[in-house]
Image (cartoon, rainbow, N blue to C red):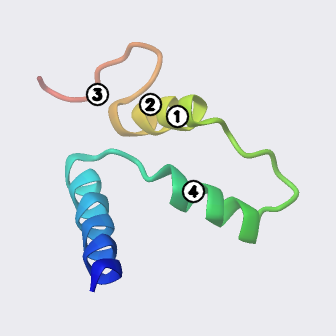
Amino acid sequence: MLTKIIKAGRYFGQSMRLMVGVPEYGTYVAHMKNTHADQRIMSYQEFFRERQEARYGGNGKVTRCC
């Protein structure tokens, strides 16, 4: 029973992060290990910065109206 509650909590947390646009680093790491084993895995800070730039535009450029 406790394992089901923990699992549900993890799914809930992941859903909340996806809803507000926070990237899932663990999913990225698993994908890189399984699919791109020859490439370097970014640190969490590098990954977060790259995802922010991809979403909002990089180099200080604002690509939205407000």
Q: Position of residue 61 (x, y in %)?
A: 36, 17
Q: Are marks 4 and 3 in contact (CB under 8 Å)?
A: no
Disc 2 target residue = 53
Q: Position of residue 53 (x, y in %)?
A: 44, 30
Residue 62: quarter of image: top left
Three-letter amino acid code of the residue under disc 2: Glu
Disc 3 target residue = 63
> Is residue 21 depicted above or below 32 in this figure?
above
Work out how far the residue at label 1 is from the one at label 4, CA to CA, in angstroms: 12 Å
Residue at image location 27% in from the left, 58% down from the top:
13
> Is residue 61 depicted above or below 56 in this figure?
above
Locate residue 56 relative to residue 25 in the image: left or right: left
Q: Which type of secondary structure does the marked residue at label 3 adopt? A: loop
Give the foreground label among 2 and 4: 4
Work out how far the residue at label 4 is from the one at label 3, CA to CA, in angstroms: 25 Å
Quadrant housing the C terminus: top left
Disc 1 target residue = 50
Work out how far the residue at label 1 is from the one at label 2, CA to CA, in angstroms: 5 Å
Q: Position of residue 11 (x, y in %)?
A: 30, 70
Three-letter amino acid code of the residue under disc 1: Glu
Three-letter amino acid code of the residue under disc 4: Tyr
Local crowd size for mark 4, using a 10 Å CA cut-off: few (<14), some (14–19), many (≥20): some
Is tag 4's residue or tag 3's residue first in the polypeptide sequence?
4
Local crowd size for mark 1, using a 10 Å CA cut-off: few (<14), some (14–19), many (≥20): some
Say how many tags the image has: 4
